[in-house]
Amino acid sequence: MQAKLIFLILLFWGMWCSSIYAQSLSSLKRENKQTMKELKVKYGLSSIKIEMGDNGFWYYLVSQKKGNQKCYGVISKNGNFIFECEYEDIIYINGIYKDGYVNYTFNSMSGGTDEFKLYNHMMLDHFILEKADTHEKLICTCDGKILKSGIQGQITYLGSWLLINTKEIYTRQLDGVLKLIIVNNESKNMRFMTWNGIEIFNDEMFLMIIANKASGNFNNVFAFNNQNRMGAIYLEDLNSIVPIEYSEIRTISGKREFEVKLHPADKFHVYNKTMNEKFIPKNPGEQFYVERKYEDCIKYYATEGVADADSKLYSASALKTIAILKVIQLQNHVQAPSANQLKDYNYNEIKSLLNDAKTILESAMSQDTLRTKVYQENINNCDVYLDLLETYHAQLKENSFGNQLLKSILAGISEGLKQAAVKSINASSLNIGKNSHSTANDDGRHNSSTSNSTGSSNSSNSGGLSDGVQNRIRQVEKNIANETEYLQHAQKRYNSNPTSAGKREIEAHKRAIEGYRKQIEDLKSGR
């Protein structure tokens, strides 16, 4: 009863607030009707209307015709221009009035949606404007002060954070934690900044991964560029930025700190912002590694670079990275098969790459005892991905179509045997009844006839198919229903954010549905 009362109070409060807002906006329009006419004449405006923010701030959104283009501006309630009519687009952003976590809903890679808890810093109401001539975007305060200029590309709003040139945003499970995956738009690198233009990572990322806030962890962010470098930040602490300069970064449990490695031969150390570390390749092998040319890196250290002190570390790291990329591809496929095709997958090859890397590292560790910790960290990393390989390879076999088909057939056979046994028992009972009551009256004979008639009707409806085949058809029909649901989710994601990957996902679901329908036809025809 108390919960219901609270709900009703909140409901009426929301309705009252909406009513107040509507009344305020409506009354503002009535009260300023004459002023709007005067302003329209005074400034030669094409249009003028009142816009109002959630906190009661209001302004005149106006436009003027400039050549063939309609350009927008903002006039204050005092009748003065805050922004001249020079903009193609003007967006008013409502503020966030306290620091803290907010729940957002994002599309999931595996279909459906996930709730994701993201930390926001306090944010003032502000404007984002796009210039009509250059398409440059600006972040400005409500009184016209420019906070950030020179922004080019599409802006994605993420609470109190801004992303520039984002292609896709979706959730997925990684390392047992829900992560938000943010991918660039292929033609340009991403930028990541605060709502007021403070750059976190500037025009150098192709991928960002944000951890969901859960018990015992924070919103840690890992950012990656295309030069094998990564950076990091905890969204809760703007002073925790690690620049995109490192080969590996890891979190420290319970702390808003990171451990970093500058290159494969480095050891993990706690990052602090007084560091000014930058990796400069000292030979072609290291340059190949930075450029992600792993096979060239391995060849270099097997020939002219074989005597280099770090040759085994870089060779092993290159082998390990080739394998890790393949394990990640396997992981993606297992978690969302319709969206991630598995190409050239070879379990034995991946396992061999990781074991070869371990062998090289163990050999190097026995000869270079001063860097035992560095070698052991890399060996441990190989073990992590060997475990992941086994886990996802087992799931791949479990989820394979042939295995699912076999399971379904066995289930159908089992169900068929059970039904046959029931029929046999019923038939035996019927025969016993006939033998015991050979003088049964017409009603008894009619009942017996009805039972046979009903049985004939069932046989007719199934088209003479065996119970096992009928069960298989029902299973395939369930698969069609599931794929149809996945297709609907994929189409929704594509409609809100049309991408080539989204289009491929839709086509994959359609092909799967068509394949299942063909299976049903084959089963019915006995092929």
Image: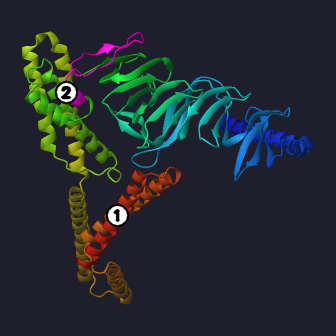
Q: Of the residues shown, which amino acid type is indicated by label 1?
A: Arg
Where is residue 321? Give x, y as percent. 22, 33
According to the picture, the residue beneath numbered tag 2 turns out to be 284
SS class, disc 2 = helix
Q: Nearer the viewer, residue 270 or 456?
A: 270
The image quarter containing residue 168 is: top left
Asked if residue 284 lies in the magenta stretch, the reply is: yes
Q: Quadrant of the N terminus?
A: top right
Residue 511 circle label = 1
Q: Residue at x 52, y 28 (%)?
A: 193
In the displayed image of the protein, which residue is found farthest to the bottom?
442
- Direction from residue 300 to residue 524 in the image, left or right: right
Front: mark 1 or 2? 2
Q: Residues within 10 Å of mark 2 (few under 14, many from 20)?
A: some
Q: Position of residue 39 (x, y in %)?
A: 87, 41
Residue for point 48% across, 39% down: 165
Mark 2 or mark 1, which is nearer the start of the sequence? 2
